[in-house]
Each structure stands twice: as C-alpha cells, then as structure tokens.
Amino acid sequence: MQKTILMIDDSVMVRRVVGQILKQSGYKVIAAEDGIMGCDLAKKFKPDLILMDIEMPNMNGVEATINIKSDPETANIPIIIFTSLGSEEDIKRAREAGGQGFMNKPICKEELKTIVTKFIG
C-alpha cells in the first residue's frame, strides 16, 4: 500500500520540488500552505509522515506540531521538521514540540529520501 506524506510549507516552490521528489519515490503527497491547514489535513487523512516547515503564516510549524501531537488521533504520526533557520534553538524548540527529525533547507534529494525511508520505509 502506498504511504502518504503530508507536507506543510508556505513556499509554493518547496511544495512543488519536494512533492515531486516524493512522488517519484512512490509516495502519495498531500500539501498544506500553513499550520492551520496542515493540522486539518493531518486529522482528515492521518498520513504516515509529516514534513513540517517552522516559519509559516497563521500558525507556525512548532505550534502545528504541538497541535498534532496533542491530538490522540494524530499523536503517533512522525513529524520531520525542515526549515531554513537551522539554529540550535530552532532544533530544540522543534524537538520539544514533538518533531522527531530535522532537515535544513535547501533540501538535498538524497538526504530527503534517506530520512523518509528511515521513518516510513
């Protein structure tokens, strides 16, 4: 059965490029442009994995991660944080919120495939 990945990022370009890489790797991709939409889609589709940007309008990635992890229906979905920020403080905040992996932007195609495979095969 095809695994589903929810990608939550406000950048159209990131959603397009990362989405294409994931689709070519055989995953179904659902995309959201902010944390509010991402939380709604996580609850609706219950994806196998979530890729979460930190800096977004309306609800940032840390807030969205807390929201997803506090809901029993979505709490067990692994969340990988990917951002251009990349400071130690950002990594700490993301981990404390429930993020289980961390990637810096720009995304390296091979690193993306490796981390996704690590979490969902």
Image (cartoon, rainbow, N blue to C red):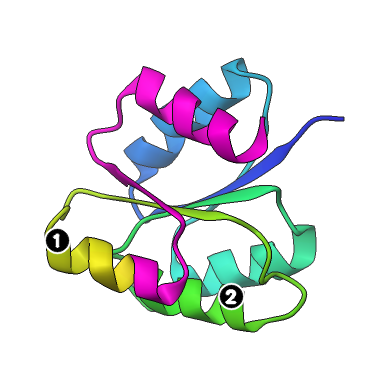
Amino acid residing under circle 2:
Lys
The range drawn in magenta is: 95-121
Pick the quarter of the image with the C terminus.
Answer: top right
The answer to whether residue 101 is left or right of residue 68 is: left
Queried whether the magenta region covers residue 77, the answer comes back as no
Query: Type of residue at label 1?
Result: Glu
Identify the residue position indicated by label 1 in the image: 88
Quadrant position of the N terminus in the picture: top right
Q: Mark 2 points at which residue?
A: 69
Q: Position of residue 117 (x, y in %)?
A: 58, 29
Q: In the image, is residue 120 part of the stretch drawn in magenta?
A: yes
Query: Distance between the Cα atoms at labels 1 and 2?
Result: 21 Å
The residue mark sitting in front, 1 or 2, is 1
Identify the image quadrant of residue 22. Answer: top right
Whether residue 28 sits left or right of residue 112 in the image: it is right
Viewer-closest of 91 and 2: 91
User: Does residue 52 appear in this view?
Assistant: yes
Left or right for 45, reference 9: right
Q: Position of residue 13 (x, y in %)?
A: 34, 37
- Residue 4 location, quadrant: top right
Closer-to-camera residue (98/41) = 98
Disc 1 crowd rating (10 Å Cα; few below 14, some 14-19, many 20+) is few
Q: Is residue 16 above or below residue 8?
A: above
Which residue is at 41% across, 79% downward? Answer: 63
Q: Which residue is most to the right?
A: 1
Q: In this rendering, is residue 7 above or below 36?
A: above
Question: Which residue: 55% across, 34% down?
Answer: 118
